[in-house]
Amino acid sequence: MQVAPFHSSEARRAKLVIEGVSKWFTPSRSSKVQALDNVSLTVAEGEFICLLGPSGCGKSTLLDIIAGLTRPDAGQVLADGKVVDGPGRQRLVMFQESALFPWLDAFGNVMFGLKLRPDLTNKERREIANEYLELVGLTKFKHAQAHQLSGGMKQRVALARALAPDPQVLLMDEPFAALDALTRDQLYEDIQRIWMESRKTIVFVTHNVREAVCLGDRIVLMSPSPGRIAQIFDIPLPRPRDINSPELAAYASRIASALKGTMKGAASE
Ligand SMILES: Nc1ncnc2c1ncn2[C@@H]1O[C@H](COP(=O)(O)OP(=O)(O)OP(=O)(O)O)[C@@H](O)[C@H]1O
């Protein structure tokens, strides 16, 4: 099955509106770092957005602000038209390290995520946990403890744990960065399949250009010092996308040049 890409020109409902967001950190009494400067971006419902940029350009800070884990010093984020003023179950985050609870097995970890759904009965939660473990291909490992799972399997459990409460927005902070290339390639296939089935709104942070082109409808390229949006690229390639295809490589090389430009610009400032 090939799925047409989402085009930013299509009239779709805005899921997230980021308006003039700035953020400063004060690591010591004498120093102040501006992590984000006046960042504005609209993410449509069901869109897959990749935030791409060199280290320190504010990708994670922006993701944390969208999640409601960090407050901006200026500007605001609206989710479904409402100002984000804290974390909520409609916007869940998945990090680079899976942070599974080591005392729980895979099933227990997914069930833990479902504590966010007090509206469900325990029987319903168990059914949903099984369903999501199946979706990520881990039914056979449902009773494995975290230490018995490979890095890729742990991230699959973390993905099932984040998806099971059925958030509208999934925020992913370099979720595959610590994995080997083969495992990552498999996960690119899986995340595309899951996204095509669920059409969640996804904001995915990465500094890997090919990964961004493989996954995103749009790539938001950020530049550092202070973190700003440098350029936005539409990726009109049909899905599912093969990370090793020549079409994808052509996009990646164009975006990689732009990325290099943002690094040079920062170095010369
Ligand atoms: N809690 C904090 N205290 C002080 N400075 C911070 C804090 N969090 C982030 N920063 C600074 O803000 C800037 C943006 O950091 P951020 O982690 O958002 O960038 P990033 O693009 O996600 O980087 P990376 O790709 O390395 O994770 C950096 O200069 C960083 O040092």
Image (tube, rainbow, N blue to C red):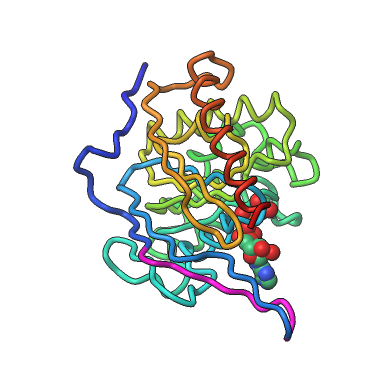
Where in the figure is residue 40, as x and y percent of width and height?
38, 59
Residue, far top: 246
Q: Residue at x 38, y 70 (%)?
A: 76
- Residue 22 lies within the magenta run: yes
Q: Residue at x 29, y 39 (%)?
A: 8
> Looking at the rendering, in which quadrant would you find the N terminus?
top left
Closest to the observer, 208 or 142: 208
Q: Is residue 42 left or right of residue 192?
A: left
Quarter-wise, where is residue 176 in the image? top right
Decide if residue 100 is in sight here.
Answer: no
Quarter-wise, where is residue 159 in the image? top right
Residue, far right: 147
Q: Main secondary structure of the magenta part?
A: strand
Q: Residue at x 47, y 52 (%)?
A: 229
Decide if residue 9 is in sight here.
Answer: yes
Closest to the observer, 6 or 240: 6
- Residue 100 lies within the magenta run: no
Closest to the observer, 147 or 231: 231
Where in the figure is residue 120, as x and y percent of width and height?
40, 59
Q: Is residue 74 left or right of residue 173?
A: left
> In the displayed structure, would residue 110 be above or below residue 72?
above
Q: Which residues are magenta?
A: 19-29
Where in the figure is residue 141, as x and y percent of width and height?
67, 35
> Looking at the rendering, in which quadrant would you find the C terminus?
bottom right
Quarter-wise, where is residue 113 in the image? bottom right
Q: Residue at x 45, y 34 (%)?
A: 194
Which image quadrant shows ligand 1? bottom right
Where in the figure is residue 26, as x and y percent of width and height?
66, 78
